[in-house]
Image (cartoon, grey):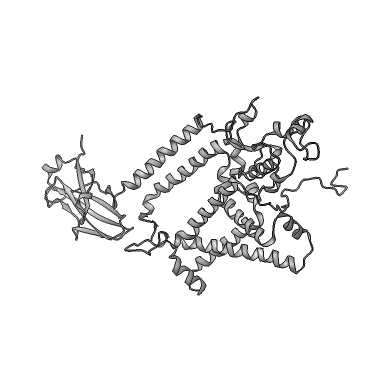
Amino acid sequence: MSLMEHGTDTTPPLYQKRIPIFTRSVKGPFRRFKTGVLVFAYAVYFLLPWLPWARPDAPSQAVLFDLPGRRFLIFGLTVYPQDVIWLALLLFIAAILLFFATALFGRAFCGYFCFQTLWTDFFIWIEHRVQGERPARIRLNRQPWNPDKFVKVGGTHVLWLLASFWTALTFAAYFAPAPQLVVDFFTARAAPAAYITVGILTVSTYLAAGLMREQVCTYVCPYGRFQSVMYEPETLAVHYDAHRGEGTHGRAAARTGQRTLAERHEKGLGDCVDCGLCVQVCPAGIDIRDGLQYKCISCGLCVDACNGIMDSFGFPHGLIRYDSEQNLAAAAPLAPHLHWKRLSVIGYGVAFVLMMGYLVWSIATRGSFDHAVSQVRQPLFVVLSNGDIRNRYQIRITNKAETTQTFVIRAEGLPGEALDLGNFDEITVRPGHSGLVQASVRLEPTVAAHTPRVEFVIFPRENPDEARRSSAHFDVPGGRP
């Protein structure tokens, strides 16, 4: 008889219930670096929509993603859908930079720069300020509900929701003039899309940074899963020096008779005093002493905690440190250092420099307009009653300047009456828009026989020096050899 028939189900659950992690605050260089990155990232994210930037034809906002106008305004640069190659380059550059950093430093991006890390860090700070240090938060979690717990826990969640709401509203401010959006939002005059966006992002930010936290990194984010493919023996990551920490008889608390290095080494004990602070400060709740784990985000807080304990006992730093597996496995480990002379690292670096250089060059050399000339294929040509041969063309001009431009179209090397643009001699195009011109070229048979291609010259009337040339076939009866 099976276990199921006895009423016992041994199938493990597909989803593990979250065990709350209460982190202890810590001081040290890695904590200061994380705080510096957080402050800088928040300053950029929350203040950028409010930075003024004068424009003649758009709101005076430094960064504005103008979806109705089909353009992105980024300081003095206007990006149109025709510049989608820039987006592709940016995505490629971001991926290469991520691979490059991972090959050198492991999950440094996750530990310091990821949005999930930044917002989770801020939410933990709010929790700490309202509920107290780690022991106080643990006691508060275990005690039954009472007015004190209701005020502290409820106040924490209210502040989380306010932070989530302002995060969402700031995101929406990148897609509409920020001052007007805030006024319209609180006076119920904003577009429905604004309320939907802010509502969804408020809830998702609150859940991800306040309730799920490390579970987003463990179960949702794919990067934590495929990072092992990108790790190499030379990659720097947060490691515990087990040889030094365990000794021959394991780690042990610093009691009488085993407080100094000499006493501990005499008894075969390692340098680890088993204080557990490396676990208590970890935002992922792991024990780095168990070895490299996919949950580790390489934030370095355990390094700060361990070094602080080493200082208090007079032991040398580096029991937990950024190091490579290759160096740790050596009989006599050297000082940790970057192993950048590797084919993968150099390849990522070269690809990053090349793509970044091409992107900068493409932006720097972009003109104020784009154009395309295509021949009308049905029919290829028309023979008029007087014997003249006519070909027709479509000329599309896209204005990429911030102001309206008027464009002049000429056919170079042909008689003046050969080019017919219809009822106008020039075309005016608004910023970010395109204009289509139906042109025809009419040539006498003798001239047409010696004109295999027609060269069009297009230039803004206000700036003739920015002339662009484009040639197209001129077909004749019987074709050309």
Residue at image point 20% right, 58% down: 426
Q: Quadrant of the C terminus?
A: top left
Residue at image point 81% right, 39% down: 256
287 and 131: which is toward the camera: 131
In this rendering, the answer to whether 73 lies above or below 334 is below
347 and 29: which is toward the camera: 29
In this rendering, the answer to whether 449 lies above or below 233 is below
In the rendered image, residue 261, in percent from the top left (x then y), is placed at 73, 34
Residue 190 shows in the view: no
In the rendered image, residue 243, in percent from the top left (x then y), is placed at 70, 31
In this rendering, the answer to whether 355 lies above or below 114 is above
In the rendered image, residue 241, in percent from the top left (x then y), is placed at 67, 34
**Res 316 quadrant in image:** top right
In the rendered image, residue 358, in percent from the top left (x then y), is placed at 37, 41
Q: Quadrant of the N terminus?
A: top right
Asked if residue 252 lies left or right of residue 328, the reply is right
Which residue appears farthest toward the top when viewing the image? 331
In this rendering, the answer to whether 470 lies above or below 333 is below
Residue at image point 51% right, 53% down: 41
Residue 411 shows in the view: yes
152 and 255: which is toward the camera: 255
How many numbered circles does the render carry? 0
Asked if residue 4 lies left or right of residue 401, the reply is right
